[in-house]
Image: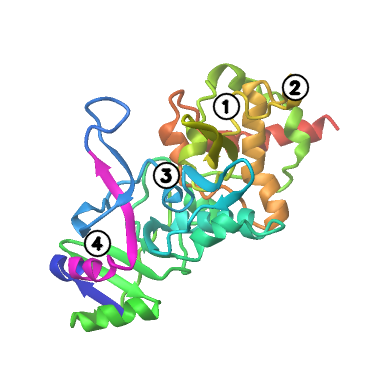
Amino acid sequence: MGFILNKISADNFLSSLKDEYYIFAPKCFEFGGTYSDTDTIRYSQINSFDEIVFDKKSLYSFKEAIFHISQTIFYFTEDQAKESNFNPKKVLIFLRNCDLHGLKRLDDIYLHNGPEDHYYKNLRENVKFVVMGCENSFENCFCVSMGTNKNDDYDLSIDKQDDNYLITCKDNEFNKILADLNISQTEIIPKFVTSNSVKVNIPDNLSNDIANNSIWNEYDIRCIACGRCNFVCPTCTCFSMQDIFYTDNGKVGERRRIWASCMVDGFTDMAGGHSYRVKKGQRMRYKVLHKVLNHKKRYGEHMCVGCGRCDDICPEYISFSNSINKLENAMKEVTSNE
């Protein structure tokens, strides 16, 4: 069943959730963009539906609301360690269809990849999701090619229509709250895009034999190894560990899990000063093949969800979708040289 909410009833719905939920959604930060006179859209807590940006794509993904950029996992002294306290308050996240597909990729890595990640699981179990419909495709999106333009595995869906909000609900808790608001009910079909201006083609015969092809060489020059593509990506999962020692007592501190990037210098450093994937083209090769080859071999679906944020954020205008589309000709070269 669907519900039609005006601004007042929509904000009343949010207000009824605030005691139990942190509510995150794409929000505009004025003058917070790349340049001093530009805005940026990223995830933050909201208090009103007016704060949610529906007509633009967020530059950063929902990931920063569930998988913290810096997370303290335990505290330590000379002779003992104590796990950090877990905040029991639940989280509600507004996100796009492609991002909800991205969540499954995070689950694959942290929950279905050997022993479950205890810290991620604690966060994940307390989160519910609201899918925001996309009436039109945004710049650089190629979700249709990746099969991530539609997802029915949500708790709520929402579409903005003029000054009203069209909501479908699959969650019993939310369904009861909405029903108690005495608002109009009707059948609602969530919106999703059916075509993108950007299209990608992943060759069926793609294999790791492409690793030594010359297509990666251009990125040795073009890429500046800033790692921005990883940090905006909804499916990049790498992290590093840092032990922080307090200045007032150097034998006491905390261990933090912090986002990492396979594109930056130092990511592959090992004991003894050794390092591999030193060239930026090698790092690009690793990232591309991880997104559209190796993850699918293990989990049955591509890691990339086609959100296009890596294209949006790159200061060198490197297009990930173009990188994918170069694979077909590169594989023809590989097979012709066998």
Q: What's drawn in magenta, residue-wise?
A: 11-29
* Label 4 CA crowd tier, 10 Å (few <14, some 14–19, many 20+): some
User: Which residue is identified by label 2?
Assistant: 274
Q: In terms of sequence position, does the residue under pointer 2 or pointer 3 come before the other?
A: 3
* Label 2 CA crowd tier, 10 Å (few <14, some 14–19, many 20+): few
From the viewer's perspective, is residue 190 above or below residue 265? below
Q: In terms of sequence position, does the residue under pointer 4 or pointer 1 come before the other?
A: 4
From the viewer's perspective, is residue 292 above or below residue 222? below
Mark 3 or 1, closer to the camera: 1
x and y percentages locating residue 4 in the rendered image: 22, 74
Q: In terms of sequence position, does the residue under pointer 3 or pointer 1 come before the other?
A: 3
CA–CA distance in space, label 2 to label 1: 15 Å
User: Is 308 placed left or right of 31 in the picture?
Assistant: right
x and y percentages locating residue 96 in the rendered image: 40, 56
User: Which residue is identified by label 3?
Assistant: 197
Q: Residue at x 57, y 27 (%)?
A: 264
CA–CA distance in space, label 2 to label 3: 43 Å
Looking at numbered disc 4 in the image, what kind of residue is underneath it? Lys
CA–CA distance in space, label 2 to label 4: 53 Å
Return the residue nearer the eye: 91 or 310: 91
Q: In terms of sequence position, does the residue under pointer 3 or pointer 4 come before the other?
A: 4
Return the residue nearer the eye: 262 or 58: 262
Q: In terms of sequence position, does the residue under pointer 2 or pointer 1 come before the other?
A: 1
